[in-house]
Amino acid sequence: MNSEQQLNKMRAALVDHKRPPHPSGFTTSLAFAWRALLKIKYVPEQLLDVTFFPVMFTLMFTYLFGGALAGSTADYLQFLIPGILVQTVVFTTVYTGVSLNEDISKGTFDRFRSMPIWGPSPLVGALLADTVRYTLASIIVIILGLILGFRPAGGVLGVVAGIMLVLIFSFSLSWVFTMLGLILQTAKAVMGISMTLLFPVTFASNIFVDPATMPGWLRAFVNINPVSILTTSLRQLMGGQVNWMQIIWVLIVSAVLILIFAPVTMYLYRNKR
Amino acid sequence: MENVMNQKDQPLAIEAVDLVKRFGKHRAVDGINLAIPQGTVYGFLGPNGAGKTTTMKMLATLLKPDGGTAKIFGHDLFKEQDAVRACVSLTGQFASVDEDLSGTENLMLIARLMGYTRSDSKDRAAELLDAFDLQDAAKRQVKKYSGGMRRRLDIAASMVVRPKLLFLDEPTTGLDPRSRNQIWDIVRALVSTGTTVLLTTQYLDEADQLADRIAVIDHGKIIAKGTSSELKASVGTGILHVRLIDAAARAEAQQLLSTTLGTPVHLSSDPSALSAQLSDTDHAAKALTMLSDHQIRVSEFSLGQPSLDEVFLTLTGKPAEDSPQKEGALE
Ligand SMILES: Nc1ncnc2c1ncn2[C@@H]1O[C@H](COP(=O)(O)OP(=O)(O)OP(=O)(O)O)[C@@H](O)[C@H]1O
Ligand SMILES: [Mg+2]
C-alpha cells in the first residue's frame, strides 16, 4: 500500500456517498437468492445430488426390480418416474437447512441480521434459489425418463402442472429443514437428522411400489403419508387426469407446513444466540 | 490526556447501563456500563471468554440482553431496533464475508441490500475494492484471500454505506505486522471521516495505538477504564524481562529480583525467563547488577511496555484466565 495516496483514496471512498433509499423486502430477498445461485456457479458439485441420485435410483429400480414389480420395465417406468421426481426434490430440500446452518456457524448471518433489512429476506431468498434447484432436479428426472421410455399421457401441460405441485410442496417442506438448520449445532447433524426423517417418509410411500401387498398397519401409514398423496397426484396429472381432491390435500398439507414451521423458523432466526 | 468534563458534554454514540447476558447459569456479561462519545475510538481489552464479543453483539442488536438498557445515538436498543441498525455496522470476530463468493460479489450483495441499484452496486464495489487495495483480487473467491485481505474486505463490507458506529471484533488477531498496520491505517481513516469505532482486542499495544479510551474486561465485568497511559501508569512505568542462561537459577533470580525491586516477579512460560514490574526504570540497572553479583548469568534482557497479561496481573492480582501464557505464571 502506497500509504498516503492509498489513505486519500480511502477517505474519498468513505466520504463521498449518499445513502440510497431503503430497499423493499422483495428486493432484498432477490439479492439473497442471487447470492445462493452464485454459489452454484462456484461449486457446481453441489448439483451432483440432484443429478446423480435420481439417475441412479431410476436405473436401479427400473432394471433391477421393474420387471418383477410391474411385469415389464417399460410399464414400471410410467409408474416410477413421477415418484422418483418427488423423491429427488424432497431430498433436495434438506440442502436448504444444511447450507443455512453453515452460514450461521460461519458468522455470515451476523452481518445480515444487524442490517436494516426485512428480517426474513435471507431465508426467503435462500428458499427462492432452492426453488430453482428443485426445478432443475425435476427437469433432469423428466428428461431421463423420456430417454428411457416414459410417455406421460398428460403431455407438456400435465408434466408442468405436476412439477408445479412438487415445487409448492417442497418450498413448504423446506421450512422444516431451515428450522432444523437453526436448532442443530452442526451441518452434519442437520444432514443426519433430516435424512433420518426423510427416509421413512419417502420409502414408506407409494413411490416405488403399490402399497396393496403391504401389511395393513403399514398400508394405513402409506396411504396418509403426504408424500404418497403428492406422488399419486403427480401420476394422475402426468397421466392426464385431474383429481382435485388429491391436489387440494397436497395444498392443505403445504399450507399447514408453512403455517407451523415458517413462524417457528423466523422466531428462532430472530432470537438466535 | 482528554479533559473529563469535556467528554461529559459530548453527545454519546453508546450509552449502556448495567448490561447483563447469561448463558445458562454463566454470566457472560455481568453489569457493563458504557458512555462512549461520538467520533472516538473505544477499545475493549480482555482475554478469551471475557465477554467482549457478547457485549458487542448485544449492542449490535444480535443478542437480547437479560438485563440493563442501552442507547445507540439516542435510539433505544429494544424499542428502536431499526433505527439502531441503520446507524451501526458489524465486522464480526470470524469473517462475516462469504468465502464462496468473490470480493466484488460480496460487496455487491451488501450494496444491493442497502438499496443500491445493480449497476450502482457494481460501481460502489469497485470503488471500495480500490480504496482498500483489493482491486487485484476483485474477481477471486474470498476463500483464496490471505487473512489480511479477508479482514480488509470484511471492513470494506461494513463501509458500503458508512455507518455512524462501527463494531470491529478483534480486527487484527492472527495477522502479521504489516497487515496489522494496514488495518490500523484503515481504522484511523474511518475515524477521520467521523465514524465512531468500538473495537475489541487482546493486545495492549493495539488498544494503545488506536483507542482514545479503553475498558479492560474480565469475567464479564469492566475492571478498569481509562486512556492507555492511565492504564499503564496503574501497572507501573515498565517491565523488565530477563532471560537466564541457566534455567535452574530461576528460583534464586526470582527471589533476588523481588527483594531488590519490591514488586511482584512473574515467571513466564519459557522456563528460563522471568519478568518484573518496575516502579522506576532506574531500578533495572540495579537489578541486573544484583543478578551478576550472585553469578546468575543473563542471556537477554529488555525493558518493555507492560503486556495485557501484566496489566491483568496488576489489576486483578492474578493472571488473565484462559490466556495461553498463563501456565508458567501459575507454577
Ligand atoms: N452462545 C453461547 N452459548 C453459551 N455460552 C456462550 C455463548 N457465547 C458465548 N458464551 C460464553 O460467554 C463467555 C464470553 O464469551 P465471549 O465470546 O463474549 O468472549 P470474548 O471476550 O469475545 O472472548 P474471545 O477473546 O475468545 O473472543 C464465554 O465464557 C463463552 O463461553
Ligand atoms: Mg470474541
Image (tube, coloured by chain):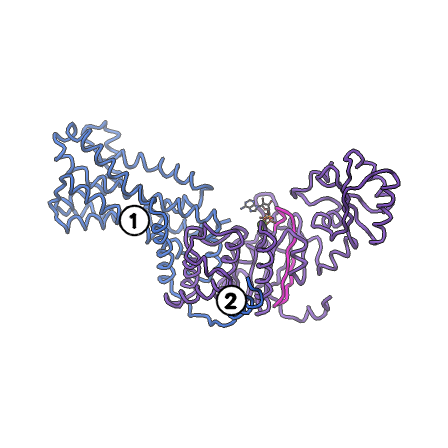
Chain colours: A blue, B purple
> Could you tell me the amino acid type at mark 1?
Arg
- Residue B131 x %, y %: 50, 65
Measuring from the top left, give residue A121's x and y in whole percent: 39, 57
- Numbered badge on residue A58: none
Q: Is residue A64 left or right of residue B111?
A: left
Residue A220 percent coordinates (x, y): 24, 33
Magenta range is B33-51
Q: Of B16 and B233, which appears nearest the observer?
A: B233
| Residue B170 on image: x %, y % | 58, 53
In the rendered image, residue B303 lying in the magenta stretch gets the answer no
Whether marks 1 and 2 lie on the same chain: no
In the depicted structure, whether residue A57 falls above or below residue B199: above
Q: Name the quarter where the C terminus of chain B is drawn.
A: top right
Question: Element under label 1?
Answer: helix
Residue B35 counted in the magenta span: yes
Relative placement, left or right, of B208 versus B261 is left
> For the residue carrying disc 1, how many other residues have a C-alpha within 10 Å: few (<14), some (14-19), or many (20+)?
many
Q: Which mark is residue A133?
A: 1
Mark 2 = which residue?
Answer: B162
Judge by depth and name the residue closer to the eye, A223 or A94: A94
